[in-house]
Amino acid sequence: MEAQRPEALSIAHLAKSFGRLSVLSDITLSVFARELVCVLGPSGCGKTTILRCIAGLIPFDSGTVASNGRQLKQREPREQGIGLIFQEPRLLPWRTARDNVRLPFELRGIVTPADDEAVRLALALVGLTDFASSYPQQLSGGMRQRLALARALVTDPRILLMDEPLTGLDMRTKEELQDEIIRIWAQKGMSLLWVTHDPAEAIYLADRIIVLTGRPTRIKSIIIVDLPRPRLRDSDAVRELEKTIRDLFGEDTLHESPRH
Amino acid sequence: MVRKWLYPVLATIAFWAIWWIVASNTRSQLFPTPWQTLRAFIKILSQASSWCQIGDTTYRVLAGMLIGSLSGTFLGIITRYSRLAEAAVQSVIYPLLQSVPTLCWAIILVLWFGLSGATPILAIAISVAPFFIINIWEGMKELDENLIEMASTYTRSHTRMLSKVVLPMLYPYIFAASKSSFMVSWKVVILAEVFGAVSGIGYMLWTSFQIYSIDRLFAWTLICAIILIAFDYGVFNFIERKYMRKWKPSDQKL
C-alpha cells in the first residue's frame, strides 16, 4: 500500500563529511505523504546533519534531496514547504509570542492580512492564543517549544523536520507535546521526519523507524510500526519492538552520552 | 523608601550650602554666590533668545549623535560582511577616530567649515562614532548564531536578516553606546561652540567670559548640567526601564 503513496521527501545516496571526517555515507530514505518517520540513532551519529542537509542549512558532498518530485538545491531556504524545528526553541526574546510566529513572513517579505490570520490560527493550533502578547522568557519550556512549533507551522509546510525537539523537557510535558504534535500532524496531513535517540519515543510516534548506525552513519534497519493510534506507551507489542531495537544496537550505545 | 530620597536631597543641600559659604567668604567678582547665579539663571531663562541658544546646542548634539551613531553602527557592522572593510575600520578608521584629541578635530573643522553649525555637529559625530564601533563589535561577539541559523531557513536576504534579527540583537549595545556617547557629546559641543560657532550654550559661555559676567557664566554652566541630567534620567533611564528589559534574559534553554 505504501508503495502507491506519493513520496513527500526522498533522499538518495546522501553523503557528507566535515574535513576528513565522514559523517554520512550513502543515506537513502524517503518519507511518504502524511507519513510520520522517525530517524533513530545514538547521539552524535549525524542525525542532525541529515536534517540540516535537507533543510538547506549546510551543503552536502553528494547525493540528492527531492521534495514532491522536485530536486532541491544545496544551501538555500526551503520555500517548497519544508519546516525545521530545532532542539532549542530559538525564539527572539525581544518579540512577543505573536511576533515570533510572524517572523517567517517578515523574513520572506511583505506581511499580508492573510498572513496575520495564519499567525492567529497557528497560535490557536498549539494552544497559545492566550499568550500571544507574552514574551518567550515569560513562558515555560514546553510552551516555548509549542511556540517554535507554531512558527514552523505558520507557513503551512507539507514536511516538518524535527530535530529532537522534546529533549530537555520533563516527562509529562514531553508526552503531552508528543500527543499534541501527533494531533496536529494528523489534522494538517503533513509528513513528519522526526529525529530522536529515544526508542520509546520513536515507537510511540512513528509509522516507520529508520535505525541508523554510527560513523560514518549508515542505515542499519527499517522497522515498520504497525500499531493503531492512539497508542499505548507500554504494551507487549511496544516492549517487543523496543527489544528488537535494543538488540540492533547492543544495549548501551543508545543511551545519551554523559556530555549531553 | 525615605532614605532613598533623603540622602540625595541632603547631599544636594550640602552642595549648595558649601558653595554659598565659600563664595560669600571669598567676596570676589570671580566667584558668584548661589543666589547671584540663580538670579542670572532666571534672567537668562526669561529671555526668549536664550532658549534659541539652548535649542541650537541641543539640535547640534542630536544631529551630531545621529550622524555619529549611524556611521559608527554602519562601520561596526560592515566588518562582519567584508574583510576589506574589517581591515580598514580596525587598522585605520577606528584608531584614527579614537586617538586624535577632540580639540584637534575641532580646530581642523573650524579651518574647513569656519564658524558654522557644521563644526560642532561634525566634532560630535567624530567623537561618538568610535563608541558605536566598539560597542557593535562587542555585540557581534555575542550574537546568537542559533537565531541567525533559524532565520536563515526562511530567507537569504541579507537586508531582512539584518533588520529583523541581527540589528535587534545589537540594540542593547547600541543603546549603551548612545548613553555613554551622549555625555561625551555635551562636553564636545560646548568645547566646539566656544571657538567654532556663533551661537549655542558654548558661545554664550564664551561671551560671558569675555565681558566678565561671571554670574552668567555660572548660570550657563548650571543650565548645561541640568539638561544633561534631565536627558540621562528622563530619556535614557526611561528607555532602559521600559524597553531594554526584554533583551536581558535571552534564556533560550528549555
Image (cartoon, helix red, strand yellow):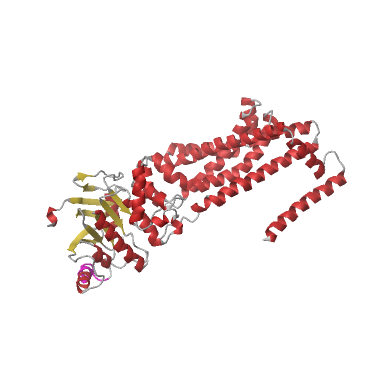
Tell me the quarter of the image containing the C terminus of chain A: bottom left
Quadrant position of residue A50: bottom left
Q: Is residue A254 left or right of residue A258?
A: left
Total numbered badges shown on the rendered structure = 0
Q: Is residue A244 magenta?
A: yes
Q: Nearer the viewer, residue B53 or B127?
A: B53
Which residue does the image show at 38% across and 47% down from the upper left?
A: A103
Q: Is residue B103 magenta?
A: no
Q: Tell me which corner region of the image, top left, top right, bottom left or bottom right, holds residue A208.
A: bottom left
Q: Measured from the top left, where is residue B74 in percent x and y?
A: 49, 38
Residue B13 visible in this rendered orientation of the protein: yes
The magenta segment is: A243-251
**Looking at the image, which residue sits at the far bottom?**
A236
- The answer to whether residue B103 is seen in the rendering is no
Q: Quadrant of the N terminus of chain A?
A: bottom left
Q: How far across and how far down the image is residue A259, in percent?
A: 37, 64
User: Where in the figure is residue B141, as x and y percent of width and height?
Assistant: 47, 49
* Vertical order, A257 against B238 (above or below): below
How far across and down, in percent of the image, does residue B41 sit? 76, 39
| Horizontal side, residue A163 vs residue B12: left or right | left
B52 lies above or below A246: above
B21, B86: nearer the viewer = B21
Which residue shows up at 55% across the image and 35% down it? B67
The overriding secondary structure of the stretch rendered in magenta is helix
Near-viewer residue (B158 or A89): A89
